[in-house]
Image (tube, helix red, strand yellow):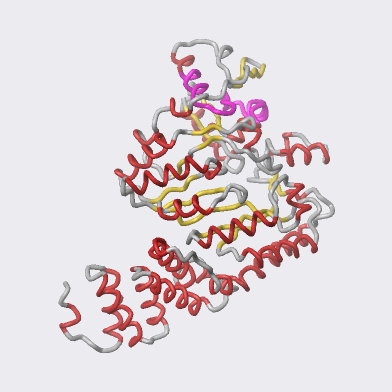
Amino acid sequence: MIGVSVLNANRWGGIDIAGIAKKLNPNVKVVFGGVAASFLWKHFLTHFKEIDAVVIGEGEYSFLNLIKAIENKEKFDAIAGIAFRNGKDIVKTQDADLIRNLDDLPVPANYFTYQHLSLTRGCAGRCTFCGSPEFWRGKVRFHSPEYFINQIEILYQKGVNFFYISDDTFTMREDYVIEICRKIIEKNIRISWFAISKVSYISEEMLCWMRKAGCIQISYGVESGSQKIRELLNKNISEEQILRAFSLTTRYGILARAYFIYGCPGETEDTIRETIDLIMKIKPLSVIFYILDIFPGTAICDAFMRKYNLTDDIWLNRIEDILYFEKDPDLPKEKVLAFGKQLRESYYAHLSEFADNIELSDNKELYPFHADFLSRLGMTFSHGDYAKIEAVSDKDQTAETLYTEALRYFPDHRAYLGLGMVYQKRRDFQKAQQILSEGIGHYPQSESLNLCMGITLMNRGDFQQKHWNIF
């Protein structure tokens, strides 16, 4: 048997794998599962004979029962939560029950090494562009904090020190989040991690605990500055909540990333202007802009299909996604692309200004974390993603400001290194030597600081042995 997890974007890759598998072994059973398979089960089984069955929705028990049935040469009819081909007919069985206690599942870290974690399944929101509400049947279930921490401990012992917590809304239960953070700190698990949240599920106490436990980025779905567009997308968030979440997240030294969607029904120059105005208010230090995609299982997709009299056969086109504007006569391609260009240009033109006006908490316990936050951001401007974007202005000056500010909070290793490299880039080797000497005083065994110092000294023509006595 071959199982293929299918998202909308990789569905053709899954179909190709199924075809290759059948050519190599005509008797192999190919089973699709995952979000796209769950919403397009009939489409896949109708059009692609190389697919034998589809697991619909939450798949652990349905897939296990399917394997047992194949091993025992039993019929599939009694297996809940699947669809399959029976001769010329396509049969869908009754829905499987959702797993009541997620902690009953085996701990995958005992068998695999990975970085993506989840505390929950499901989302309390019902955003019209997202398939999560339908896939999880509008319910939210939680692992216990103990189960979650156990995964982290096992993976940490395997050498994993960065995690992406991929819950739709990780911070939904504040008590669970704080307990998890306490345990990470108590057990001295030195990790960094990203999370996803909703602007209405944030508190200062929780953010403080998250930062001390290693959280360095939280992503928020803002989607639009237009209340009209947010209502269309059923975001159920206010501008006041958005402003508060971004201000507090940054205050505690966590990078607040904003997701925006453009090219929505009713999008105009005015709504784009509203989005730009909101960006100016929240001053995000990371933004991702998306064009509205159509995904099976979403309310927007259902309305789209009805409005334009379409069927699931649209997914027979060998493309990853379908963009909403492609069918909407009020959203010509050129206009939507211009919207995206306008958003990006405006954001990048002000990004350095946002970075120069960061307001952090005066809690001295957080000073080392503030330094880490500022130096990470500085490295993004001087040597990371922002360094490569021409539209971002004053990159090196912004990086210098961030590194310098970081060192006011704490003797941060990355800040010393970054500032030294900024001075090297300017060929100000005297300043580079001064700051690197200070850094080496704090971190005498640092290979990167000493290497950077060596480069500085060579550029100054100084090869005296006294500079190298640490080796």
Q: Nearer the viewer, residue 85 or 357?
A: 357
Screen quadrant of the C terminus: bottom left
- Where 446 falls versus 325 (above or below)? below
| Horizontal side of residue 274 vs 108, given as left or right | right
Q: Position of residue 88 (x, y in %)?
A: 66, 17
| Horizontal side of residue 277 vs 187, given as left or right | right
Q: Nearer the viewer, residue 388 or 440?
A: 440
Residue pictured at 46% horizontal, 70% vertical: 378
Q: Position of residue 310 (x, y in %)?
A: 79, 37
Asked if residue 458 lies in the magenta stretch, the reply is no
Q: Position of residue 299 (x, y in %)?
A: 73, 38
Asked if residue 52 lies in the magenta stretch, the reply is yes
- Where 51 falls versus 407 (above or below)? above
Residue pictured at 61% horizontal, 31% vertical: 139
Q: Position of residue 51 (x, y in %)?
A: 57, 27
Task: Inspect this view and state whether residue 390 appears.
Answer: no
Stretch in magenta: 40-67
Task: Inspect this view and state whether residue 300 appears.
Answer: yes
Which of the 4 image quarters holds residue 282? Answer: bottom right
- Where 233 falls versus 46 (above or below)? below
Residue pictured at 52% horizontal, 36% vertical: 120
Residue pictured at 53% horizontal, 45% vertical: 171
